Amino acid sequence: MELRKLFLVLLLVVSISLEDLTARSMLRQRREYPHRPQDSTAERNMVELDLSYDFSVPGETFRISFVVILPETIPGRQNILGIKYSQKPTRIFNKNGNRYAEFVFTRPGRQEKVEINIRAELLRYDLFTAREEAEKKHYEDTGLKDFLKHEKYIEKDHAEIQQIAESIDGHTQIDIVKKIYNYVIDNMEYTTHNDKDWGAVKALQSKKGDCTEYSDLFVALCRAKKIPAMFAAGYTVRFGDVSPKHNWVEVFLQDYGWVPFDPSWGDFENFILRDRSFSRMRPVYMYLNHIRNDEMINNSHFAGYKYWGDRAKVTDSIEFKRISPTFPMIR
């Protein structure tokens, strides 16, 4: 009887110790990696996003063309419930699978501003939900050649990328993707946001970077293994001082179609947390762009501008807000 009581006490102590270890690990990760979304594990998130772009025109600038990507409804990923503008866009157009708004300023004043308000419902979608919804149907891998190619920042044909890819094997696509995920995390150290993109090769050589470098290396290794993969750019819901701008990836799996993964968010030393992050992603992602080198926005991720005359400068401000799920839809 005494032995049984001792066993139960030891079991309780071990359980508490494991819980404390996990909690302390998560707390440390949050302090060291503030870029990670830290919201609840709910299936959906109702949010409001305010975007503000302030233009400074110190000289003789004759014209400014500003183009911003607009989020669109993606079944199972996000529902865009309404978009408002501080001024009517000069045009709204679609190209290469993206939707854009262009604002043109002719003879701009010293200060110009564009404000955009977006209301959206963000839905949870990850490997776990993809497995639940797939019903074992086969997805045709047609029209995917653009997601297997070598391109700027995703240098999948580079000798060093190919060498790493050859060392990675697995019985299934998911096995290979999981090993790529672990390789990127084990060989990268997260740093603060870079002013310029480095690309997969420099990320591999320097072994550091932000979410952009994690994603570039991940996509390059997938493509080197002949698994279609693409770069994803958008915003993550944050209610602190960290920028919501974020990059992650999507991989085409034959049994499930396109499935998102976030290697920089999964950069945990704790393998339990890392494995969980591989298959589960919170509904905190607003998708914008899957084009790595988007000429419509000067090869950036979110927006771009051109000017005629003296140089004009722009600064942006991004703020997410939680909103009630009963708000009225904006027409």
Image: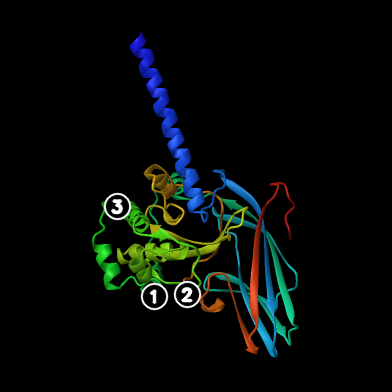
The N terminus sits in image quarter: top left
User: Disc number at residue 172?
Assistant: 3
* Tag 2 residue: 293
Left/right of residue 108 with respect to residue 93 in the rendered view: right
Label 3: state its secondary structure: loop
Which is in the foreground here, disc 1 or disc 3? 1
Q: Give SS at disc 2.
A: loop
The reply to whether residue 109 is in sight is: yes
- Tally of marks: 3
Distance (Cα) linking label 1 and label 2: 8 Å
Crowd tier of the residue under label 1, counting other residues whose Cα lies within 10 Å: few below 14, some 14–19, many 20 or above: some
**What's under tag 1, amino acid-wise?**
Glu
**Residue at mark 2 to residue at mark 3: CA–CA distance:** 30 Å
Q: Secondary structure at mark 1?
A: loop
> Residue 270 at what x, y percent from top left?
39, 44
> Which amino acid type corresponds to the residue marked 2 in the rendered image?
Asn
x and y, in percent, of residue 255 in the image: 38, 52
Looking at the image, tell me whether mark 1 or mark 2 is earlier in sequence order.
1
Disc number lying in front (2 or 3): 2
Snapshot quadrant of residue 98: bottom right
Residue at (42, 31) in percent of width and height: 17
1 and 2 marks in contact (CB < 8 Å): yes
Q: Residue at x 31, y 66 (%)?
A: 224
Regarding residue 281, the answer to whether it shows in the image is no
- Along the polypeptide, which appears first: circle 1 or circle 3? 1
Residue 151: mark in rendering: 1
* Pointer 2 local density, CA inside 10 Å: few below 14, some 14–19, many at least 20: some
Q: Position of residue 261 (x, y in %)?
A: 44, 55
Asked whether, in this view, residue 249 is left or right of residue 287, the answer is left
